[in-house]
Structure formats: structure tokens, C-alpha cells
Image (cartoon, rainbow, N blue to C red):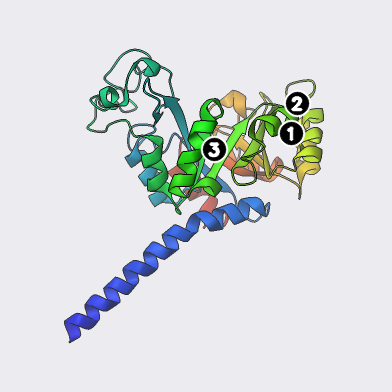
Amino acid sequence: MIIRKIYILLLLLFVLQLTIAQNRATEIRDRLMNRDQSSVLVVAHRGDWRYAPENSLPAIENAIRMGVDIVELDVQRTKDGHIILMHDATLNRTTTGKGLVADWTLDSIRTLRLKNGINIRTKEIVPTLEEALYQTKGKILINLDKADRYFDEIYPLLKKTGTTKQVIMKGNKSAQEVKQQFGKYIEEVTYIPIVNLDNENSEEQINLFVQDMNPVAFELLYENDTNPLPLKIKDKLYGKSLIWYNTLWDTMAGGHDDDMSLEDPDKGYGYLIDTLGARILQTDRPGYLIEYLRSKNLHD
């Protein structure tokens, strides 16, 4: 009888943990939709590629496990029309194969092995987008990069896997172009405009997007702190749209990148958050960023 009760208790705990995990994506999306200023969302660039090969299922799983909010993934299409996770148009850098992804069938690509960040062959194989969507379902949001090229083919996969509301698309098209190309999708799929603040018409672009589409966030780029717009845009967007910065390399966020943050996170991540109002940061060091944010009570 006691063993039976313990078994039932363990089963209930497992179901509870599964329910919590599957509700996490909804909670993250609600924070995004509500323009929540109380915390910072962490985006893992190509998954946690320091743990496993970029755009691989283990890299995604480790990002989920460490508490990342959004995972950025890249897509390409095979010769026989399958959508796979791959950043480059060629297989050369990240797999044991060579040549264009578009010249290989999925079955052939599955015979290859992914390489890690120091170019060493691993046991991992190239995943399909569908596999990644099932893996992330209910657990995390997904930023699909390069997806606009095939979105008419990708959307049925989102419907099939029940992940339409977990997906974020970004791009530098105008508001009019976005509505024309993706209008039938953006009620469910979240679209975030990318605006380079070093461009002459960048403030006008932002004004048009706010007026025409009311986006939940903007990804902003600028090369150095001599540009006065990042400070100005912080005030302009407060309460309207969240601000997303990439800390992958210095010219994306005025030098306040991962490298600066390793030396002094307050000058890197802290500057983007406190001075420029960033509430979404995309990083190649998600574990390090989460640790910093938790020390500031800015991440669960």
C-alpha cells in the first residue's frame, strides 16, 4: 500500500512538472505581449552552441534547461523541400558534408554529422524544423531566422505542431511590405521589426511601424555611443514596444556586447538594460547573462 501511494505521488509530481513546463511558453509570450518592463527576456543565439552544435536538438534542450526564454534558430530548405535547422546555405562549416543545402535531399543530409564550435565532428545529426518545434512545444519561444523565404511552407508545420503562437519572425522590411507578405500570419505569429539606428530614416521607420502595426518589440542596432538615437528611442518606445538588442558582437549594440560583459557586465548588459531600456537581449552566452540578470532580480 505504501509503495502504491509513493508511486501515485511520484506520478502526480511528474504530471505537475510536465504541466508547468508546457505552460512556460504561454507565460513568456504573455510577458512579451504585455510589454512587461519588470524583467529581461534572454534569447540564446542558435541554441546553447557552447554546449552542443549550433541549431542542434541538444543545444536547444540545454537552453530550455538553463531557463532561456527565446531560442533563435535558422532554417534552410533541402532539395526535396524539407525545412531543416541550418544557418549557412552550405553544409561545409557545420557538418561533415560539403556543398549547398539546396543540392542535398534530407535523407542524404541525415547521413552527415554536425560539427561543434571548434570544428570537431559530433554524434549529432541535422534536425528538421518539425522535430525542433515538437521539442520546444509549450516550453520556450522560437525566433525563426531566414524563415520569411519559406513561410508559406513553414506555417503548416506550426499549425501541425501547435506552435504558431510560440514563433517570432524578425525582418527589416517596411510595415507595408510586412502586412502584404505576412498579413495572414501575424495575428498568431509575432513579427518584430529590425531597425538600424545608424540609418538616416530609422526614426521615421519606427514611427510608421508604431502607427501601422503596434509591434510588441523592436530589434535595434547601432555601432557606437556617439549616436544619440538609442537614448531618444528608449523614451519614445516606453510603454509601446519592448527594445531588443543583440550582444553577439560589438557593432550591433554600440560595443556593449558579450565580450565587454565578460569584463564588466554592468558596462555591457547593464548599460543596455538600465541606460537604453533593453528588455530582450540575444546572446552567445545565455548562462552567463541569466546569472547576471538573476543577481539584479531581472530574471526568474
**Amino acid type assigned to the residue bearing label 3 in the image:** Gln
Disc number lying in front (1 or 3): 3
Q: Label 3, on which residue?
A: 282
- Labels 3 and 2 touching (C-beta < 8 A): no
x, y percent for residue 167: 53, 43
The residue under the point 31% across, 28% down is 116
Question: Who comes first in sequence, dot 1 or dot 3?
Answer: 1
The residue under the point 45% across, 29% down is 75
Q: Judge the density around disc 3: few (<14), some (14-19), many (≥20) Cα neighbours within 10 Å.
A: many
Image: 91 above or below 83: above
Q: Judge the density around disc 2: few (<14), some (14-19), many (≥20) Cα neighbours within 10 Å.
A: few
Q: Judge the density around disc 1: few (<14), some (14-19), many (≥20) Cα neighbours within 10 Å.
A: many
Foreground of the two, 90 or 237: 90
Q: Label 2, on which residue?
A: 227
Residue at the outermost bottom position: 1
- Secondary structure, mark 2, is loop
x, y percent for residue 50: 36, 35
Q: Quadrant of residue 236?
A: top right
